[in-house]
Amino acid sequence: MTRGDVIIVDFPFSDRTGSKVRPALIVQADDFNARLSDTIIALITSSRVRFVGAAAQLPIDISTPEGRATGLRLPSVVQCENLVTIDQSFVLRTIGRLPDTLMKRIDGCLKAALGIKS
């Protein structure tokens, strides 16, 4: 499990009444992924309605080579404003990977989401 992996996660509802299987992006640094039982993820949605062009969101176009590398089946949006810490046991499988060019853009989205000035 490494930073940039697109994963399928069994994501629990906040009220603990169930869970939803959905894609996510691992954004936590690799050294922490290796040492800790938790990881930090950015949720991914295929609902384009949620995309408002925000600086904290990255659309994934699956018709491009970069988009196909993610393993996502539908056009999607990485929501860097929607970060979650989960136990690594919730990760069901890895389906793909964001290429370095997209991860550089994710870094910018994370800065925007967290209010980090360059």
Image (cartoon, grey):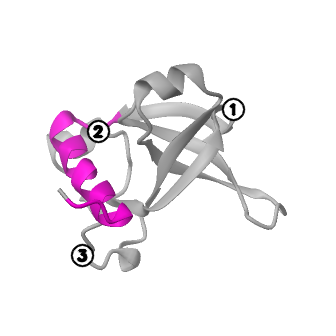
Check contact, mark 1 vs mark 3: CB within 8 A.
Answer: no
The answer to which quarter of the image holds residue 91 is top right
Check contact, mark 2 vs mark 1: CB within 8 A.
Answer: no
The answer to which quarter of the image holds residue 77 is bottom left
Residue 89 circle label: 1
Q: Does 116 appear above or below 28?
A: below
The amino acid marked with disc number 3 is: Gly
- The residue that mark 3 highlights is 53
Which residues fall within the magenta stretch? Answer: 97-117
> Residue 24's x, y, as percent?
48, 48
Q: Main secondary structure of the magenta part?
A: helix
Q: CA distance from mark 2 to mark 3?
A: 19 Å
Which sits in the foreground, 82 or 70? Answer: 82
Task: Count neighbours of disc 2 (C-alpha within 10 A) and say few if under 14, some if 14 to 19, many if 20 or more.
Answer: many
Q: Quadrant of the C terminus?
A: bottom left
Q: CA distance from mark 2 to mark 1?
A: 21 Å
Secondary structure state at the residue bearing disc 1: helix
- The residue that mark 2 highlights is 98
Secondary structure state at the residue bearing disc 3: loop
> Residue 109's x, y, as percent?
27, 58
Residue 1 circle label: none
Task: Count neighbours of disc 3 (C-alpha within 10 A) and say few if under 14, some if 14 to 19, many if 20 or more.
Answer: few
Q: Residue at x 32, y 40 (%)?
A: 70
Q: CA distance from mark 1 to mark 3?
A: 32 Å
Instruction: Say which label, 1 or 3, has the lower sequence index.
Output: 3
